[in-house]
């Protein structure tokens, strides 16, 4: 169980720039891992590959003990939809949907929208957005949009959370709140949390920090 990445390489462009240079990483089920490193070191690239959203140029990736190459597109889509929550560096909220509709977006595929509506409202309350359920993303501040995106990542109670600088647009109160939630779901629900962050205080809350420099894990 968990995530197993073996000898992951990633090249971009022709001639290829090697952005990841042989990453070996095992992440246990329920582990809370932070990924740190300088801008351009390859953190987002690695996060996308670990989450199966982007293919590696070489190397193997296993999720829950299954090699992703052995999964059909449909299996992989379902795995992502039901078991993974994503918080991206840019939020990708759908501009024509309200905040609460964005949070409920991942429930549509499994037709669990009504069953999860109360949870969506609870998450919005927890993030201090109870009076903004019906706002469009364009009518929210950057930090409010970020919290909507985090609520969306949590709505399906996923086994995995992949978060790319989730506190980047948040003040310290909301940043701390998000960290408390990640810490709690990792302990109580065995959610595996993988988070890129530049904030050393938040990295210190994780069970383990993985440091990337120039496409390699350094200790
Ligand atoms: N789609 C792409 N095409 C070409 N080069 C890319 C692409 N995506 C990323 N890169 C390059 O790969 C390197 C690593 O990028 P990545 O986004 O992983 O860095 P990062 O560590 O997340 O940085 P930051 O802290 O600024 O978000 C950079 O040099 C970047 O320019
Ligand atoms: Mg990045």
Image (cartoon, rainbow, N blue to C red):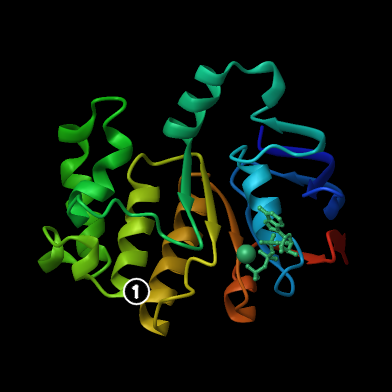
The C terminus, quarter of image: bottom right
At 71% from the left edge and 52% from the top edge, which residue is drawn? 46
Q: In terms of depth relative to the viewer, which is nearer, 162 or 40?
A: 40
Q: In terms of depth relative to the viewer, which is nearer, 197 or 69?
A: 69
Q: Which residue is mark 1?
A: 143
Q: Position of residue 83 (x, y in %)?
A: 48, 34
Q: Position of residue 150 (x, y in %)?
A: 38, 58
| Residue at the front extreme of this rendering | 14
Q: Name which quarter of the figure residue 51 lies in.
A: top right
Q: Position of residue 81 (x, y in %)?
A: 43, 33
Q: In terms of depth relative to the viewer, which is nearer, 53 or 154?
A: 53
* Position of residue 74 in the picture relative to residue 21 (left or right): left
* Residue 58 seen in this snapshot: yes
Q: In terms of depth relative to the viewer, which is nearer, 209 or 52?
A: 52
| Residue at the bottom extreme of this rendering | 172
Q: Name which quarter of the figure residue 60 lies in.
A: top right
* Position of residue 124 in the picture relative to residue 19 (left or right): left
* Residue 67 seen in this snapshot: no
């Amino acid at each position: 169980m968990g995530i197993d990445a073996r000898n992951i390489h990633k090249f971009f462009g022709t001639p290829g720039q090697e952005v990841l240079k042989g990453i070996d990483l095992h992440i246990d089920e329920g582990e809370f891992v932070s990924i740190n490193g300088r801008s351009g070191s390859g953190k987002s690239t690695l996060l996308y590959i670990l989450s199966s959203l982007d293919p590696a140029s070489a190397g193997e990736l296993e999720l829950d003990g299954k090699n992703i190459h052995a999964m059909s597109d449909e299996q992989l889509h379902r795995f992502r939809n039901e078991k993974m929550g994503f918080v991206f560096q840019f939020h990708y909220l759908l501009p024509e949907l309200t905040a609460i509709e964005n949070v409920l977006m991942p429930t549509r595929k499994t037709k669990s929208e009504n069953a999860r509506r109360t949870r969506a409202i609870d998450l919005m309350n927890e993030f201090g957005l109870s009076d903004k359920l019906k706002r469009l993303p364009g009518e929210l501040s950057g930090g409010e949009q970020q919290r909507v995106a985090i609520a969306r990542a949590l709505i399906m109670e996923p086994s995995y959370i992949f978060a790319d600088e989730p506190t980047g647009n948040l003040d310290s109160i909301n940043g701390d709140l998000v960290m408390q939630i990640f810490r709690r779901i990792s302990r109580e629900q065995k959610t595996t949390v993988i988070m890129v962050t530049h904030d050393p205080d938040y990295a210190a809350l994780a069970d383990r920090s993985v440091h990337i420099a120039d496409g390699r894990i350094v200790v």
